[in-house]
Image (tube, helix red, strand yellow):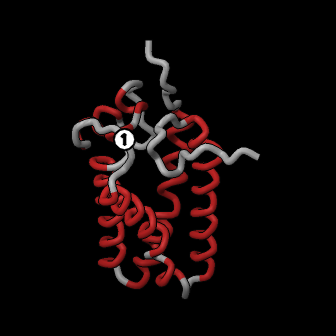
Amino acid sequence: MCQVYRFTLKDKIVGQLALNAGVLIGAYGMWLSSPWLALGYLVYVYGGLVLVTRYTVCPRCPHVLEADSCLFMSAGFVRKVMSDSRSGPLRPGEKLILYMVFGGMALIPIYWLLPHLWLLGAYVLAQAAMSLVFRRYLCRVCENEICPLNKPEPAG
């Protein structure tokens, strides 16, 4: 029997809402200026998440590999998309992919949201909620030690 935590339906719903709320608000703000920009942003984000799935954290994830569980997609789909399972720390290129995807996801829409303060406020709240949900809820049950978000709390 597998000892790795299997994400619950609640975990998956919360994770999906936390991740996608800010992305969709950001894309809507960009859409108001140019639908092409918004579509480009969505391709960047979701294409980038495929790269993250293929090369960075997911090929080292015990939830996918041992418990057949994933927060964001079906574990079967993740196993089809990801490269061979990997071990050890992220290599520099893998870290670059990870930080470019999540950094771009958070920063790219801000310029287009500035003229729409109510959207900018909603976006900032969604990004803050995503950070809180991940750090305070999802990362606490995650057993993927290679994920940069899943660092042990400092002793104190």
Q: Is residue 130 above or below residue 66?
A: below
Q: Secondary structure at mark 1?
A: loop
The image quadrant that residue 93 belongs to is bottom left
Q: Which residue is mark 1?
A: 88
Residue in the image at 38% along x and 25% along y: 66
Instruction: From the top left corner, tell me how far across and down residue 150 is, in percent.
Output: 54, 45
The image quadrant that residue 30 belongs to is bottom left
Residue lying at the far right in this picture: please name it.
156
Instruction: From the top left corner, tell me how far across and down residue 6 is, in percent.
Output: 49, 27
Residue in the image at 61% along x and 39% along y: 140
Residue lying at the far bottom in this picture: please name it.
115
* Mark 1 neighbour density, 10 Å: few (under 14) some (14–19) many (20 or more): few
Q: What's the amino acid at mark 1?
A: Gly
Who is closer to the viewer here, 59 or 132? 59
Q: Is residue 42 left or right of residue 155?
A: left
Instruction: From the top left corner, tell me how far across and down residue 26 is, in percent.
Output: 47, 71
Which quadrant of the rendered structure holds the N terminus?
Answer: top left
The image quadrant that residue 155 belongs to is top right
